[in-house]
Amino acid sequence: MNEGNKGISRSQERPARTSSGYLMLFVWLALIAWTIFAFLAFGGAVNDPPGHVPWIDGQPPLDTTPAWPWAIGWVGGILALLFIAFGFFMIQPNMSAVITLFGEYRGTERTQGLRWVWPWIGRKKISVRQHNIHSEKVKVNDLRGNPIEVACNVVWRVSDTAQAAFDVDDYKAFVNIQIEAGLRTVASRHPYDDIEENETTLRSDGEIVNAELQTELNERLSHAGIRVDEAGLTHLAYAPEIAGAMLRRQQAEAVIAARAKLVLGAVSMVEMALDKLNEGGKVHLDDERRAAMVSNLMVVLCGDREVTPVVNTGSLYQ
């Protein structure tokens, strides 16, 4: 943990305690039936037959059943229905809900289906599915100081919902910013391309650079409960202001490398030819003739154009 994170208490995900929503749904349906029954009973207790005006003619209502118990049952049924209804929530596949009680973290629910908690308990849904982000092109200087443009594609997911919910302000915005920062860091560690030295380059060693980028992002995002499953460069080019000059440099380096390999092969072929001629003592060449043969063979092997042979019918010294 770095110095800037020592004072931060890290959250850790743990299972939450919730109830099955299907059992509470059965209770809720039963309360609906009770509420309807109480309403009908309350209406029957206060209504008299047509033409009868209670207490006006000195006669009480024909139905002497008290109406207030049914009124209490009806109102209580409505309140109970509202109480239970506000406790339902649903968890879809690869989704989760962070449970809080008056600001205190009480666990994470990952069980799929209909769930129920007390209505005053907070629920914040967080997706644990894989997310795919294609970053914008960013300009950065490589190890040689050359300005280049790079972009990457990152596949990430939430691995610890408690850290994602409580340790960062907005974990999605945090991911976007850290991807750009990690891309700049990795791109500045390596040269764009270098033929002369045997080192890791952005253009030639894509698998190594991609693995390094994934490791860098996992280190940066681990404090937010984010796991990077895949990361790789999708765009790599020199900046427009130096693209033409660097293209000519690449072409020159490619020509030099090809020439060096061609000369190395030609030298080995000349040595093999001289060795074959000297085997068995069939051909005897003094130093001057050997030098002339080496010169001719090198011209033939290293030339850009086809060589026209010249047949010498006289002496080599004439």
Image (tube, rainbow, N blue to C red):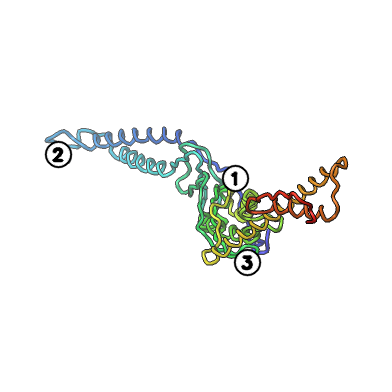
Q: Comparing marks 2 and 3, which lies closer to the viewer?
A: 3
Q: Nearer the viewer, residue 168 or 177?
A: 177
Q: Name the residue rendered at 30%, 33% in the picture.
A: 37
Q: SS for tag 2?
A: loop
Q: Nearer the viewer, residue 263 or 221?
A: 263
Quarter assignment of residue 175: bottom right
Counting from the top left corner in percent of width and height, residue 30 is at 38, 32
Q: Comparing marks 1 and 3, which lies closer to the viewer?
A: 3
Counting from the top left corner in percent of width and height, residue 206 is at 62, 50
Counting from the top left corner in percent of width and height, residue 132 is at 51, 48
In the rendered structure, the answer to whether residue 149 lies left or right of residue 304 reads left
User: Mark 1 or mark 2: which comes first in sequence?
Assistant: 1
Local packing at callout 3 (Cα closer than 10 Å; few below 14, some 14-19, many 20+) is few
Which quadrant would the C terminus be assigned to in this image? Answer: bottom right
Mark identifier at residue 197 = none
Q: Name the residue rendered at 61%, 54% in the picture.
A: 203
Image height check: is 153 above or below 28?
Answer: below
Q: CA distance from mark 2 to mark 3?
A: 100 Å
Q: SS for tag 1?
A: loop
| Disc 3: which residue | 145
Mark identifier at residue 14 = 1
Q: CA distance from mark 1 to mark 2?
A: 66 Å
| Disc 2: which residue | 53
Which quadrant would the N terminus be assigned to in this image? Answer: bottom right
- The residue type indicated by label 3 comes to Gly
Q: Comparing marks 1 and 2, which lies closer to the viewer?
A: 1
Tag 2–tag 3 contact (CB < 8 Å): no
- The residue type indicated by label 1 comes to Arg
In the rendered structure, the answer to whether residue 74 lies left or right of residue 232 reads left
Counting from the top left corner in percent of width and height, residue 101 is at 52, 50
